[in-house]
Image (cartoon, grey):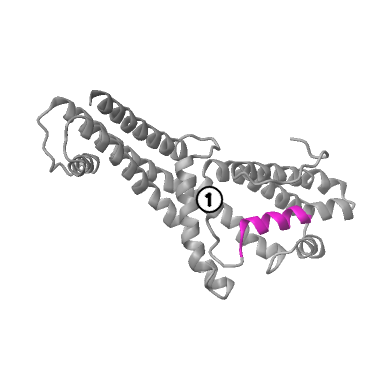
Amino acid sequence: MIILQIILVVAGALLVVWTFMSAAKTFVVPRSERQALTVFLFAVSFRFFDFFAQRRETYEEKDRIMALYAPLTLLMLVPFWLLLTAVGFALIYWAMGVRPLTEAYIISGSSLLTLGYAQFDNFFFHIASFSEAVIGLMLVAMLISYLPAMYSAFSRCETAVALLEVRAGWPPTAPELLWRLRGLDIDLAERKAFWRSWEQWFTEIDENHTTLAALVFFRSARPHLSWVNSAGVVLDGAAHSLSLLDDDEESTTKAVVPRAGFLALRRIADLFQISYLTDPHFPE
């Protein structure tokens, strides 16, 4: 019996630590890293939303459903982590003598959500209860601090995507982009500023879409806008301009855009384990 209690305590503690570390690495650690719990929840949620989206006839209807996928799944992360934390502490309470298991879970939930209606008469129960309450508050605080940073990054990304319509038409295309940049007699300084802004944009999505991975699944405000399509248009436009137009002064500025773009897209693809063809002419 003692061995079983030790196993349950260790199992519960490992579940709590694993859950807390997953939340910390997802919300706090500024590094691109796949978290098993986060990936699991997003994968399950995607199947749910995709099930209903595939039963719609038009793209606009499908897009309306899938636009809810990332925001709602993101909000579900904290309840999911709280549930796992409650289960982990319930195992610990059960090993400490709380019977039956349902009562151990009730005590765990009361401590985690700081409801305070479960009573304790043991010092070790109080230590576990206080620890659980602190963990619950920290998980909620992580999400609260995470959302403003995410939506700020999303806003900056989508502003550039929306502005591209002005330069590249609707839907945006590389030939239209080049025609507007060169055919409307836009001066050299403004063309250079355009390419520099997209070099900066690619650098930002490299940072934001890997450290704030949920941003990849956020959809634009308009159904046919997409940061992926916009990236492709700008990269195609830069490549076509470099190969077809003879402009040494502008070329020095726009030549770095393709490299900034493929580095950003490669790193995002690596995070989501998406395969791609490598090009020996563009080494890392």
* Residue situated in front as seen by the camera: 167 or 258: 258
Q: Amino acid at mark 1?
A: Leu
* Residue situated in front as seen by the camera: 21 or 168: 21
Residue at 50%, 52% in the rendered image: 43
Q: Is residue 188 magenta?
A: no
Q: Is residue 266 left or right of residue 238?
A: left
Residue at 13%, 40% in the rendered image: 118
Numbered circles on residues, count: 1
Location of residue 185 by image quarter: bottom right
Element at label 1 = helix
Give the image location of residue 269, x and y in percent: 64, 45
Magenta highlight range: 225-237
Q: Is residue 109 left or right of residue 276?
A: left
Q: Name the residue furthest front.
A: 1
Residue at 48%, 48% in the rendered image: 150
Residue 2 visible within the image: yes
Q: Is residue 231 magenta?
A: yes
Image height of 152 relative to 111, above or below:
below
- Decide whether the magenta segment is chiefly helix, strand or loop: helix
Residue at 74%, 52% in the rendered image: 235
Give the image location of residue 248, x and y in percent: 87, 46
On the rendered image, what quadrant is the C terminus found in?
A: top right
